[in-house]
């Protein structure tokens, strides 16, 4: 039973929710969760679950972004000039973000080679 409660606490914490919420969901005291958080095995499992969660989230966001880009691309060919202008504005305004991510990726790759 304790393992199930621990699993519930791990899942709740991995979503980025508070210790208080994890305590409520798993039906253990906050002190118990704080004690678990001091243990290396619990911290490692939490880190692993967080990585899994963010990996799933990243895949979903990528799929959503691809759909949004398709809509944006179609909007660029709209007969309505205001829609075309708005789509162009959106595309241009996001180029700096894309360039920043590209630069960060290059820097990380260089650091990993060290």
Image (cartoon, rainbow, N blue to C red):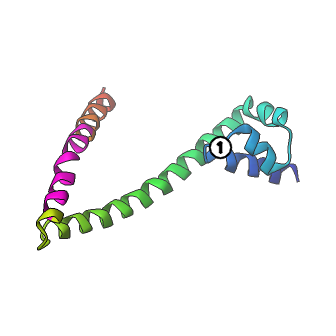
Check disc 1 and report its element: helix, strand or loop.
Answer: loop
**Image location (x, y in percent) of residue 72:** 23, 64
Whether residue 63 is in magenta: the answer is: no
Residue sitting at x 65%, y 43%: 17
Residue 47 to residue 75: above or below: above
| Magenta segment | 84-100
**Image location (x, y in percent) of residue 106:** 24, 36
Q: Is residue 62 left or right of residue 9?
A: left
Q: Residue furthest bottom?
A: 79
Residue sitting at x 28%, y 35%: 104
Q: Which image quarter holds the N terminus?
A: bottom right
Q: Residue furthest right?
A: 1
Image quarter of residue 31? top right
Considering depth in this image, is 34 or 71 the residue closer to the camera?
Answer: 71
Circle 1 sits on which residue?
17
Q: Is residue 8 left or right of residue 80?
A: right
Q: Residues within 10 Å of mark 1 (few under 14, many from 20)?
A: few
**Image location (x, y in percent) of residue 63:** 37, 63
Number of numbered callouts drawn: 1
């Amino acid at each position: 039973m304790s393992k199930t409660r621990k699993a519930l606490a791990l899942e709740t914490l991995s979503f980025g929710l508070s210790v208080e919420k994890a305590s409520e969901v798993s039906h253990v005291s906050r002190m118990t969760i704080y004690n678990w958080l001091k243990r290396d095995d619990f911290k490692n499992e939490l880190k692993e679950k967080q990585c899994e969660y963010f990996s799933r989230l990243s895949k979903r966001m990528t799929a959503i972004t691809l759909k949004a880009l398709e809509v944006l691309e179609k909007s660029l060919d709209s007969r309505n000039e205001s829609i075309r202008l708005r789509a162009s504005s959106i595309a241009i305004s996001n180029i700096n973000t894309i360039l920043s991510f590209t630069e960060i990726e290059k820097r990380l790759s260089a650091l990993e080679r060290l």
